[in-house]
Amino acid sequence: MTRLTNMLRRHEGVEKYVYKDHLGYDTIGVGRLVQADIGLGLSDDEIDYLLKNDIARVEAELEAEYSWFKNLDRNRKDAMIDISFNLGATRLRGFKKSLALMETGDYSAAAQEFLDSRWAEQVGNRAIEVTTMIETGEYQNASA
């Protein structure tokens, strides 16, 4: 780190979570004002950086928890990453039948089990898209 970086970190403080600064504005990191009406928010590059790190984290979690995950084709891995990204690891574990069917390679039945859930009702088209990916092994959106 540069001397300037060290000084700014010391003066502003370093926060991993959104907090209210001394004026009551939503702030994060090293004094980054993120309040919608007056803040900088995040640049597209920063958003992409965070997303890339989050995808890598979720993929590593899936690889560590489910031995069968590494054997999936790339598109089915992407579908499972999407589902886990949305649900989180703890809630994903609740899909015991779906996960067992993924392990055996019965992707059609696994997709149906995922669809037969409150999660699918809540996320609508997202569930249809990713479960179709699980069933077919193909991306459903032409822009993907």
Image (spheres, rainbow, N blue to C red):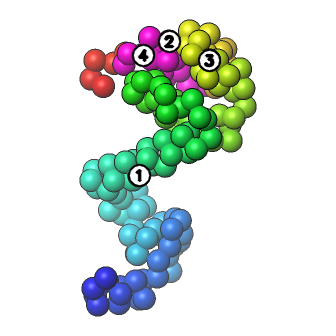
Q: Residue at x 50, y 46 (%)?
A: 60
Residue highlighted by disc 1: 53
Residue 104 in the image: above or below residue 11: above
- The mark that comes first in sequence, 1 or 2, is 1
Q: Is residue 123 above or below residue 63?
A: above
Q: Which residue is mark 2?
A: 135
Viewer-closest of 26 and 47 = 47
Residues at circles 2 and 4 in contact by the CB criterion of under 8 Å = yes
**Residue placed most toward the observer, 118 or 25:** 118
Could you tell whether 131 is left or right of 11 in the image?
A: right
**Is 131 in the magenta?**
yes
What residue is shown with label 3? 104
Percent coordinates x, y for residue 46 in the rendering? 32, 56
How many numbered marks, from 0 up? Answer: 4
Q: CA distance from mark 1 to mark 2?
A: 27 Å
Name the front one of labels 4 and 3: 3
The local secondary structure at tag 1 comes to helix
Which region is colored magenta?
122-139
The nearer-to-camera label among 3 and 1 is: 3
Q: Which mark is residue 137?
A: 4
Q: Which amino acid is tagged 1?
A: Asn
Residue 24 x/y as whole percent: 51, 73
Of residue 128 and residue 77, the one placed in the foreground of this image is 77
Inspect the image, locate mark 4, and give the three-letter code of the amino acid beneath it. Answer: Gly
Callout 3 amino acid: Thr
Secondary structure under tag 4 reads: loop
Q: Pick whichever of labels 4 and 1 is earlier in the sequence.
A: 1
